[in-house]
Image (tube, grey):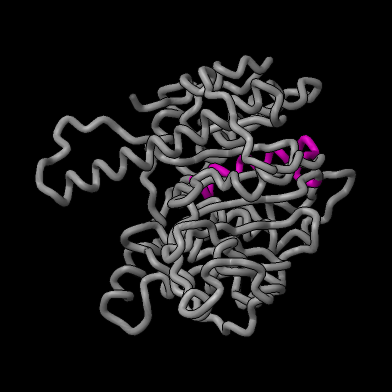
Amino acid sequence: MPLNDHDLHAALSPVAEPGERAPEPGIALCLSGGGYRAMVFNLGVLWRLNEIGYLSRLDRVSSVSGGSITAAMLGLKWQRLNFANGVAQRLIAEVIDPIRAFAHETVDVGSVLAGLFLPGSISDKVAKAYRKHLFGEATLQDLPDDPPRFVINATNVQTGVLWRFSKPYMRDYTVGEVRNPTVSLAQAVAASSAFPPVLSPAKLELDPASFSRASGEPYHHAPFTTEVYLSDGGVYDNLGLETAWKRYDTILVSDAGLAMKADPDPGSDWATHSMRVLDMIDNQVRALRKRQLVSSFLNGVRKGAYWSVRSQIADYNAPAALPCPDARTGELAQVATRLADMPDDTQERLINWGYAICDAAIRRWVDRSLPAPAAFPYPRGV
């Protein structure tokens, strides 16, 4: 039976991995996938976290897919945010406004057509758009020194496990590690957001000599160390949870993923039926991660909060929460998973919704002493 946000409170008991070390004190923010919907929703999340002084307290930002666009821009501009008393004075100018401008660019259709009929892959075209509009020639080495560490996650299609990009290293634990990688930020985000099947895979060509000495990795050899084929980070972990969960004791998860809908006519031909079954499998894996996460909060294994674009704000019972009617937020939860022009009205509603639900979750589950917000970032509400 498919899970929804209400089911999360009937959570599974978490199971620790053998030999798993205890988490260290620190706060990690996880930003999920979901195309421009996730990219823009998470702007509201950053806005509220900044107001309450939590943005400056982050030790890690772990992201996948659409969330990686926002995270990478935050990382690139981190040194220019002008923090004063723990609050970034230039978050809107350096991060929110540029991403809002980019949300008017339709990237997916043009990249698909150019990748089909011109030299270069579809993922190359997506990276070109990211480079032109957001990241320029910046590389992973332009991200800030810790803290926070920014981890951009993709999925290695060859090995079936996570491939993580960060400033100190990029790594697949079955292949090995490249220290101080100079991969472009645009290419890393394109790999993280290579939504299958149309935008996937992204190909990395590497020098085997760039890898650190082998330490027991089973695939520390060619072709795994020469040509790496990557897909959307959400294929492996749509919450961007793994690289944060294993390190820190406080986990904040912002989930802008699209819920699977019931389909009265799922089709009986092999192609559509196969896609429907694969979607069901994917939906259940994601739901299991959410159950385990929330169970861990309830059982004291981790501290933190989970919120979703599909949440109902009343469930959080936060005092003086901003007014967010379920019918209106439900519309926002169904915005298509696209890299396509998003109207200003939709952008502002999504930002307001991310701001409001993040606020409710933090004030209910993390710090009840925080003051309620005075108003939405934009006057139109959700």
Residue 3 falls in which quadrant of the image? Answer: top left
Residue in view at x 62 percent, y 40 percent: 17
Residue 2 falls in which quadrant of the image? Answer: top left
Residue in view at x 49 percent, y 55 percent: 233
| Residue 204 image offset from top left, x and y in percent | 49, 76
Query: Is 282 left, or right, of 53 in this rendering?
Result: left
Query: Is 234 left, or right, of 49 in this rendering?
Result: left
| Residue 322 image offset from top left, x and y in percent | 61, 23
| Residue 252 image offset from top left, x and y in percent | 66, 37
By secondary structure, the bulk of the magenta-drawn segment is best described as helix
Quadrant that contains the N terminus: top left
| Residue 165 image offset from top left, x and y in percent | 61, 64
Q: Tell me if residue 133 can be seen.
A: no
Report the front residue among 53 and 185: 185
**Residue 338 against residue 373 in the figure, above or below:** below
The segment highlighted magenta reads 38-56
* Magenta highlight on residue 43: yes
Q: Tell me if residue 268 can be seen.
A: yes
* Magenta highlight on residue 353: no
